[in-house]
Amino acid sequence: MSTAYSESSTERIPGRAWTVRIIGHGGRTASVTCSTAACRMPPRSQDLTALRTFAAAHAAAHAKAATVNPYARCYCGSQRCGAHTDTRTSCAGAVVLILRHDPRVPRVWSLEEVCEMCAPLIANATVLARAARPNRTTTPANRPAATGAAVPAPARPGIAGGFSSAPGEGDPAPVRRARRTSQRPRRQQSGNGQ
């Protein structure tokens, strides 16, 4: 008789979170950062409006790429519910993806997988997606992956100095642009040996 290891059907994985932030630098410039290291960000710029537009679109692209995992633990709960310290609750219910963006702090966008109990208690949070109900026949081996699919980054606005649209959005490594090859016309050799 052999004994096989079996995972509990209620085993949970950590809830994911992404933070997109605009950081100011000296010389009246700023840059956009993302908590996902694989994301490619625009260079520093003085055009704060364009950076803000890019940051909001970048957060939206993460939300679009992320499939909410029904087996995720509440990210808020893993942070000891620090986002709603005035109201205590027990984490429960289905997993939802929220966007936190406080208009009084317009330089930070946070996406988090949280439970249905915490979501309405978090200030400036909007529910973007809900986890699909897990199939009863779903086994731990074929559960949804902890990361979303790669998506191209939003088109980058024309910031001083200009830059093009570039990939690199979502959880996995960025999609690479094809390398440009220039083909020069070949010189025809003359038949007289020159």
Image: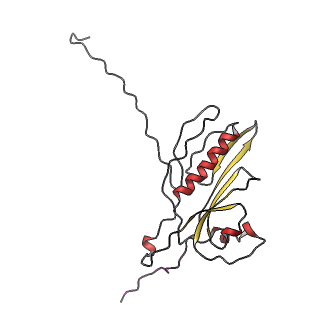
Indicate whether 8 appears above or below 105. Answer: below
Residue 80, image x and y in percent? 71, 71
Q: Quadrant of the N terminus?
A: bottom left
Is 113 located above or below residue 45 in the figure? below
The residue that appears at 54% across and 65% down in the rendered structure is 68
> Which quarter of the image is occupied by the C terminus?
top left
Coloration mode: secondary structure
Looking at the picture, how far across and down is residue 162, in whole percent? 60, 33
Q: Which residue is more in the foreground, 156 or 38?
A: 156
Relative to 132, 58 lies left or right:
right
The region drawn magenta spans 1-18
Does any portion of residue 14 appear in the rendered image? no
Horizontal and vertical percent for residue 40?
57, 46
Of all residues shown, which one is farthest toward the bottom? 1
Task: Check the image and name the residue furthest to the left.
Answer: 191
Q: Please tell me which residue is depicted at 59% across the width and 49% down the height of the picture.
A: 58
**Residue 26 or residue 95, whichever sits in front:** 95
Prevailing secondary structure of the magenta residues: loop
| Res 17 → quadrant | bottom right
Asked whether residue 9 is in view, the answer is: yes
Q: Is residue 50 magenta?
A: no
Residue 73: quarter of image: bottom right
